[in-house]
Image (spheres, rainbow, N blue to C red):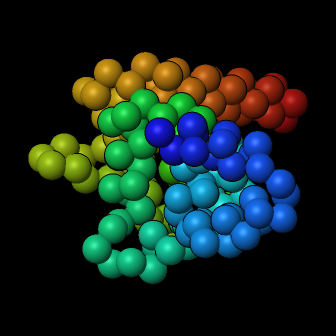
Amino acid sequence: MCNNIMERIKNIPIEIEREIYSYISNDIMMCSSKHFYLKYHSSVVKKILKNKRIEYDTYIRNIVRNDYYFIFENVVKENFNKWTNNNTNNNPNKNNIFKKYIYKTNIYKNYTDFLLDFCTENESTKCRNLIAIRLKSKEEKIRKREKQN
């Protein structure tokens, strides 16, 4: 329904379109198209992080449950190194909140391992494949570095 409305808005004069968009919140705009998702994603994530009732990992689990590949792909791009215990500034002493992840009664080595299991549990094949590809790519990069040394 939302996409249908957005397509109808595109068929009206640009001045009226801008006026209509000024009344639509970023949260709603983000859900209307890939373009708007990319445009408003960071502001909505900041809003989620500030809201204590909605935790970021709950947001991610919801994405996985629904197998929202496009959204999950962007979240993975932003967070993959954190999830796999890599520090972006190469500081080995810096604590990483994703070193161990506990969900229900299970303890996972890192957040990525949890997500793989969660994807399988929720039959989110696209999301699971995305993580598996990223992990395989990471392992290949590590092997290449080890061969160079």
> Could you tell me residue 62's position as x and y percent?
35, 46
Q: Is residue 136 left or right of residue 50?
A: right
* Front-most of residues 128 and 136: 128
Q: Residue at x 77, y 50 (%)?
A: 12
Residue 32's place in the image compared with 19, above or below, is above
Question: x and y percent of residue 106 in the render?
Answer: 19, 43
- Return the residue nearer the eye: 85 or 50: 50
Q: State the count of labels.
A: 0
Q: Position of residue 29 (x, y in %)?
A: 60, 57
Whether 143 is drawn above or below 86: the answer is above
Query: Foreground residue, 74 or 129?
Result: 74
| 137 vs 16: above or below | above
Residue 11 appears in view: yes
Question: Which residue is found at the position 38% from the left and 25% from the top?
Answer: 124
- Residue for point 39% across, 78% down: 51
User: Measuring 54% from the left and 32% from the top, which residue is drawn there?
Assistant: 69
Q: For the C terminus, which image quadrant?
A: top right
Counting from the top left corner in percent of width and height, residue 131 is at: 53, 30
Instruction: Tell which of 32 and 57 is nearer to you.
Output: 32
Q: Is residue 80 visible?
A: no
